[in-house]
Image (cartoon, helix red, strand yellow):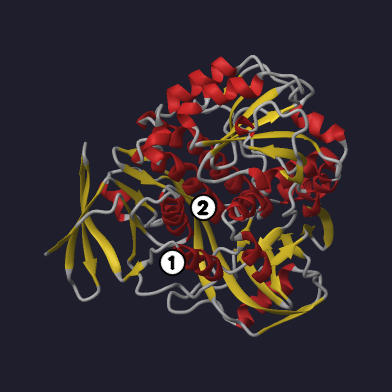
Amino acid sequence: MLTVSSPQVLISGAGPTGIAAALELRRFGIPVRIIEAQEGPSKTSRAIGVQARTLEELELRGLASEFVRLGNPAKGGTIYGDGRQLLRLDFTRIESRYNFLLLLSEADTERIMREALAREGTRVEFGVKMVAFAQNAEGITATLEHTGGRLEEISAAYLIDAEGAHSLIRTSLNLEFKGKTLDEHYALGDLHVDGDLPVSDLHIFSSEYGFMGLFPLGGSHFRLIASNPPGDPSEQAGPTLDQLQAIYDQRAHIPARLRQLGWSSWFHINSRMVDRLKIGRVFLGGDAAHIHSPAAAQGMNTGIQDMLNLVWKLALVLKGQANEELLDTYQQDRFPVMRSIVARTEEMTELIEAKNPLVRGLFNHLTPWIGGLNFVEENATARISQLALNYRKSALSADQAAGGSLRAGDRVPELHVRAVVNLQNTGRRVRPEYEEGRLFSLLNPTRFTLLVANLKEASSLSAQLANVLEPWRQLIAVVQVEASSIEPKKKFREYFGTIPSLILVRPDAYIAFRGNEHSVTKLAEYLRHWLSPGAHQRAA
């Protein structure tokens, strides 16, 4: 058996969740190994929906433009019931520059992220699987099996389980995967559709026979998913083109001819999750921690965002720049998100494929009325796009008195501002040189950003901040922001109010601390609690 010197983190599983973890760790300079039992990259499309919040996070990492270039942006979602349109959700109302649902093959998603990881000096090790592991207070040891049977023993400080629904790590930890398998069979096929289906929308058909959805992948190329397919699904082969055409004709009132079938599959929907995301030095994320209905394209996005929440915390702890208590906030932040998504997707699936005549009648009657309310549509699109996700109840979110609607735990909004970067180094400049730009572009996913809003010209706040932030000067960039000339000042005041405010933004672009000009002492207490003083010396 070969024994190899340790990386700091071992990642098992190289789907989007695992690659996201590896990419983030490498960007922080953390040595990693990422292994994948499959012999090579998957070529099937699998998860195809990339939500606005995921694209915002990818933008910070320089990857969003390539995703958008290759994908097909769906501008809306139309729901039909018993031969008529019931509702159209307008995704352009999403308050982000990514005001659409991007439809892109998971094979492309993984390739883009894998290539970015290679640029950071790390490659996925295909044909290597975890066969055993153990952990103690000092770290973990694992036995890996390579193609051909060669065994390797490895040590690491931490292990990330991104192995998916059939995780060996989760099973070895005796973690119960609580939930259920839904009774319905499902059919899936990637194919071309000739008919009057706008490629700008995804299309959901609800009928007495069951649910059917068509998701535009570009041009005439669509993903078709249907519940309760007629006949007995075969274990040897996926659904045929004729079977999918029969399902379409049975459930859609819009004539269309299906052709050129690519990947197809039969599947069941599992709705399950663990109740612990951290066991000693092992973290679980993605399908290893939660699986659910593909309704509303939440799964892959949730897995990627699991890692974006975890990894900056893990990296700072490994670098000695944060206290280990920070790692416990992964559970506090992400468990409520996972629980909500599992419950909502299950409810949505059961409602839209209901065959009970009474339930169907109520659905067909009430959906157009409820969906026509502006606040309902805004709420629905914010939830689907994952922009509404927040960590307000996390121990990591601290709120002091301040103006505006932003709260600790909220996402940083899409907003144009005028800004001065690194305010603490500018002294008390009477006429600072502002630059116009997007608030999001001021953030850095490897450090904190302190936004100082509505600063009075004669204020001594910048000098106070320079003194207080000195122990963490390599971890925190200070940016003075004010209303932009590009959009109404009303929008800036809505978020930031009119009094001087301090908004500390985490590396994952959520607000950690919010206060006013008198909250500098509280900010210092917050930083001492979570981060290690003198971190700039270790960073250097």
Eyeballing the image, is 249 above or below 305? Answer: below
Front-most of residues 202 and 350 = 202
Residue projecting furthest to the bottom: 260
The relative height of residue 412 versus residue 28 in the rendered view (above or below) is above
The residue to which callout 2 is attached is 304
Looking at the picture, how far across and down is residue 327, in whole percent? Answer: 40, 35
**Count of picture labels:** 2
Q: Measuring from the top left, give residue 522's x and y in whole percent.
A: 55, 16
Question: Which quadrant of the figure has residue 423?
Answer: top right
- Secondary structure at badge 1 equals helix
Q: Is residue 162 left or right of residue 116?
A: left
The residue depicted at 69 percent of the width and 26 percent of the height is 428
Which callout, 2 or 1, points to the residue nearer the camera? 1
Disc 2 is placed on an element classified as: helix
**Residue at coordinates 39% horizontally, 35% vertically from top-left?**
537
> What percent of the width, then of the height, locates residue 476?
53, 35
Between 322 and 351, the one lying in front of the other is 322
Q: Quadrant of residue 99?
A: bottom right
Q: Residues within 10 Å of mark 1 (few under 14, many from 20)?
A: few
**Quadrant housing residue 37:** bottom left
Q: Nearer the viewer, residue 151 or 168?
A: 151
- The residue beneath circle 1 is 118
Identify which amino acid the numbered label 2 is placed on. Ile
Q: Position of residue 133 (x, y in %)?
A: 21, 51
Asked if residue 321 can be seen in this view, the reply is: no
